[in-house]
Amino acid sequence: MLRRLHRYWLGRPFQAGEFAPLFTAPPRDEWVALDFETTSLDPAKAEIVSMGALRIQGSRLMVGDALSLKVRPPDSLTAQSVVIHGLRHQDLDDGLPLEDALRQLLAFIGARPLVGYHIAYDRAILQRHCKRLWRLPLPHPAIEVSRLYFDAISRRLDGAHIDLHLAAICEHLGLPALPAHDALTDALTAALVFVRLRYGAAPDYPKV
């Protein structure tokens, strides 16, 4: 109830505009896995160079409807930042203006909660740009898959060291090792972890 009221309160200035769907009641048992590739690891400075998003409906991943967008290279794209994401200026020449890409992303997300690995980082960047461009607050809760994994393991193995690297989580859960540092692939990996933990059997003890 409090969450619905908070969503309504935030959405009052946007009730008649293009962003109104963000503040409606989220669809039942639906989420969006989200990942950004950026120019920095600091969410207060990072600029988006690519974004990947994938809808989750119950235990199904809507891969055929996934969103993968490149963004025109920002001024902060340097040789040092290319090391993080592997995208060069020439790789982004056909990218969208950031504002256009964000409009597509927000329309794709709608009111669905966000899922991801280090999702607080991605949400903070999205929130910063939305406030800068449109003074738009985001009402979406964020679900961290590494936290879900930690909670699932620590309930059964209290006090043990738990490796929360994404590759280690996937290996333990028997999920495929997909290439890292691609926005859509990273979103897909987070979605797989989420569905496995939410709908699969409780994970066995990890090897320690």
Image (cartoon, grey):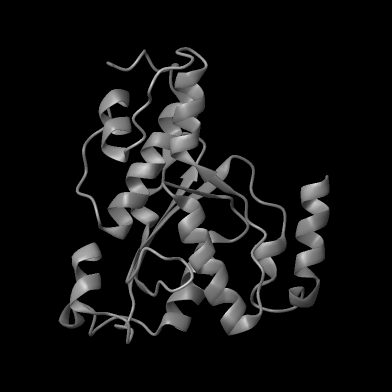
Q: Which residue is found at the position 45% from the left and 39% from the top?
A: 145
Give the quadrant of residue 92: bottom left
177 or 144: which is nearer to us? Answer: 144
Q: Which residue is found at the position 51% from the left and 53% from the top?
A: 120
Which quadrant would the C terminus be assigned to in this image?
Answer: top left
Is residue 97 visible to the viewer in this orientation of the structure? Answer: yes
Coordinates of residue 47 in the picture (x, y in percent): 39, 75
Q: Which residue is found at the position 67% from the left and 69% from the top?
A: 137
Is residue 87 visible to the viewer in this orientation of the structure? Answer: no
Coordinates of residue 99 in the picture (x, y in percent): 47, 82
Q: Which residue is found at the position 19% from the left and 48% from the top?
A: 179
> Viewed as shown, does residue 196 lie left or right of 49?
right
> Viewed as shown, does residue 193 lie left or right of 120?
left
Q: Height in image: 29 above or below 162?
A: below
Q: Height in image: 152 above or below 83?
A: above
Which quadrant would the N terminus be assigned to in this image?
Answer: top right
